[in-house]
Amino acid sequence: MAYDFDKIINRRGTYSMKYDPVTRGKPEDVLPMWVADMDFAAPECVINAINEQAEHGIFGYFKLGQEYFSVLQNWFARRHNWTVQPDWLVTTPGVVNAIHVAIMALTDPGDGIIIQQPAYYPFLGAVAATERRLVVNQLTEHNGRYGIDFDDFERQIIQENVKVFILCNPHNPVGRVFTAEELVKLGEICLRHKVYVIADEVHQDIVYNGHNHLVFAGLNEDFSNITVTCTAPTKTFNLASLPVANIFISNEKMRKRFLHEYDKFGVSQIGVMEIAACVAAYTDGEEWLGQLLGYLSDNMKLIDDFLKTKLPQVKLIKPEATYLAWFDFRELGISDDELDEIITNKAKLWLHRGTTFGAGGKGFMRMNIACPRSILQQALEQMEEGIASYSLA
């Protein structure tokens, strides 16, 4: 069937965090394109599965069965050439939750945790909340593409006594899909210095033509033996408010430490609606995903063409994955406060300020482009008008 991603769905008054600017200090009339949830309805198979579960009318205690794992196993084998085993699986109410638990399970207060900035900002929060030390391996940018300074990565691991590396692949916010060569280099360094890896691979299904996501733990058994792999259907199928994450830990000792730490929270398992949604998405959502990827690719092309013809002083760091566009405004030669003033109060857009992702985000902003194309066109025109009005002033 054909899915209508052009349909505009009114999300105001639906408890949407994305569409509640006033509570976050933004003007009421801004167009929200910041947080990473889509403005598209979930796949029909997911909606039907949730409706069917609701109509059943009983929401009692449950136990995950073999069907749930089989669906996951089939998905990762088919989509990512990765064979997972039943005893590796731990379900949690989210990837960020799992990262907190993994840090506490694998390290002690004061230990170094290395991340690659610009980086998904909850990584910083997780390090701070668990009273560990943040160590930053700054990604390098050359001609609109980010890379890794491997020498600096290894030097910092040694000097800062790093115990855990949080790998974000595909990377948020810069949109890189790291190659096998890059991942092997990172893995070999971590093995050499006995560093655990927490691999946030939540964006693994939103990958564009010409690029291929490789599961870090799937590259070889040694990497798998030091890795906590964090996955979820939430980004792929727009299920953020159905908190479900599937965490895979092949190393039995690591998994026991993770479960021991997780038990301290007294957190219940995922709910029956989350199970229904996850099973339906991974069973019957592939056609929807294929059409989504095509639509997102066309949205990225619209942005690239618009900037080149209308706003050449603004550059798109073209993503290899994710539905998050990383805009480079540095040619404007203005401060981040001035940029925020232009985007928020003149262009009337609510984007994610680049410095939220670390010092490497200075002069950048992140835009969620998973929206109907007419909304994206409107946002780009507002950006053009906002920058023009500032320049004229």
Image (spheres, helix red, strand yellow):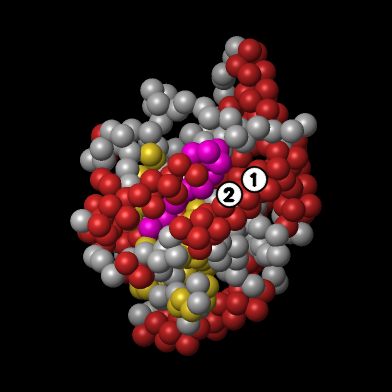
Confirm or deny contact between disc 1 and disc 2 (CB under 8 A).
yes
The residue segment tinted magenta is 365-375
Image quarter of the C terminus:
bottom left
Residue 251: mark: none
Query: Residue at the location (38% across, 23% down)?
Result: 13
Relative vertical location of residue 289 with respect to residue 326 in this rendering, above or below: above
Query: Residue at the location (60% across, 62% down)?
Result: 320
Q: Where is residue 123 drawn, in percent x and y?
A: 40, 59
Residue 299: mark: 2
Query: Image check: 359 left or right of 220?
Result: left
Query: Image check: 61 left or right of 173?
Result: right
When asked about the image quadrant of residue 178, the answer is bottom right
Q: Where is residue 286 drawn, in percent x and y?
A: 74, 42
When asked about the image quadrant of residue 277, the answer is top right
Instruction: Say which element carries label 1.
Output: helix
Q: Nearer the viewer, residue 328 or 206?
A: 328
Q: Where is residue 342 drawn, in percent x and y?
A: 27, 53
Query: Image check: 64 left or right of 258?
Result: right
Residues at marks 1 and 2, CA–CA distance in whole angstroms: 6 Å
Q: Residues within 10 Å of mark 2 (few under 14, many from 20)?
A: many
Q: Nearer the viewer, residue 359 or 142?
A: 142
Q: Where is residue 168 drawn, in percent x and y?
A: 51, 63
Residue that badge 1 annotates: 295
Query: Residue at the location (42% across, 63% down)?
Result: 314
Instruction: Say which element carries label 2.
Output: helix
Query: Residue at the location (37% across, 73% down)?
Result: 136
Does the magenta run of residues contain 174?
no
Image quarter of the N terminus:
top right
Going by the numbered disc 2, the residue's amino acid type is Asn
Q: Nearer the viewer, residue 25 or 5?
A: 5
Q: Residues within 10 Å of mark 1 (few under 14, many from 20)?
A: some
